[in-house]
Amino acid sequence: MPELPEVEAYRRLADKALGRTVASVRIGDQRFLRGGTDACRLRRALVGKAFAAARRRGKLLVLDVDDSDRRLGLRFGMTGRLHVDGADGVDRLVYASDRRLEAWDRFALRFTDGGSLVVSDPRLLGGVVLDPDEDVLGPDALDVGRADLHRALAGSTAALKARLMDQSRLAGLGNLVADEVLWRAGLSPLRPAGSLTDAEERRLHGHVRRTLEELVSAGGSHLGELMPERQVGGRCPRCGAELRRDRVGGRSTWWCPAHQR
C-alpha cells in the first residue's frame, strides 16, 4: 500500500495542482530525496514553474514541468499519502495510520495562490526524485496488453505472484491486488510463472484488467472480495475452504488451495 488504485486516485487529485506556479519547495526530511536528488536541484527545477500534466506508471506518480523537460517523480511506499490544498487522495491506507501529523510531511510545494501539494509518509518508505527513470518499469498493469503479460511470465521459474509484483515486468501490482487477482483467476500464487497454459494466461490477463478497474472505481486496493478474509481462520468467499497463508516474494500471501491451482 499504496498500490495502483491509490496512486491512480493521487494522480487524479494531482490534476488540481496543474497550471499553478510553485512559490516554494520544503523538504521535511532529507532522507525522502531519492536517486541523487537534492533540495537545491529541486528548487531550481520547480520554483517559478508550473506542472503541465500528472501521469502515472504503475505506482509512480509523475508531474511534468511546464516549458521544461524536467519531471517530478513521487513514490509512496507503504504509508505515503498525497494532499492537495488539504484534500486527501484516498480515505484509507490499510497499513498506515489515519492520523494527520505535520511531522509526517516529508515534501511540500507551496503555490503562489496559497495552495499546496504535500506528501506525508510516516515510515519514510516513499520518496521524491527529479527526472525519474521510467524505463526501468514494465508496462502499466491497468492497460497491460495480452502480449506484454505473456512476455512478463514466459519462461520464468519464479513464483507467479512474485513475478506479477516485479515492477520491472509489470508496473502497479502490489500485495493486496496480486492476491485478489490470483484468487479471482483461480491460480496458485506458488505456481512457476512460466507454467501457465494459454487459456490460464488469457484468464489471468482478463482478471488483472477487470480487478484493477473495479478497485480504482471502488477507491482502493483494500476493497476486494478476498480482503476481509485475509486473516487466520479466513474462508474463501467462493467455496468456503479455509485460506492458506504463505510468504511469496517476501510478502504475506493468502490464497485458497481448494480452487487456486
Image (cartoon, rainbow, N blue to C red):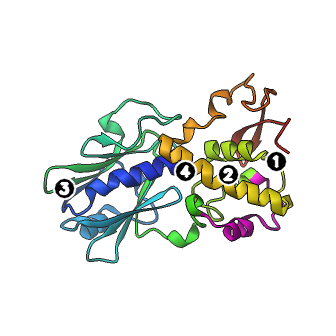
Query: Which is more toward the observer, 155 or 48?
Result: 155
Above or below — where is 137 with respect to 95? below
Marks 4/3: CA–CA distance: 33 Å
| Residue 30 at least partly seen | no
Q: Residues within 10 Å of mark 4 (few under 14, many from 20)?
A: some
- Report the side of 61 relative to 168 (left or right): left
Q: Which residue bears the numbered disc 1?
A: 190
> Is label 1 in a helix, a strand or a loop?
loop
Q: Are marks 1 and 3 in contact (CB under 8 Å)?
A: no
Q: Which residue bears the numbered disc 4?
A: 213
Q: Please identify, in this view, whether the residue under mark 4 or under mark 3 is nearer the observer.
A: 4
| Residue 152 screen position, x and y as percent | 71, 66
Among numbered discs 4 and 1, the one appearing first in the sequence: 1
| Residue 213 screen position, x and y as percent | 55, 50
Query: Which is more toward the observer, 14 or 218?
Result: 218
Three-letter amino acid code at the position of disc 1: Leu
Marks 4/1: CA–CA distance: 25 Å
> Magenta residues?
144-160
Asked if the stretch drawn in magenta spans residue 7, the answer is no
Q: Please identify, in this view, whether the residue under mark 4 or under mark 1 is nearer the observer.
A: 4
- Report the side of 44 relative to 13 (left or right): left
Q: Which residue bears the numbered disc 2?
A: 207
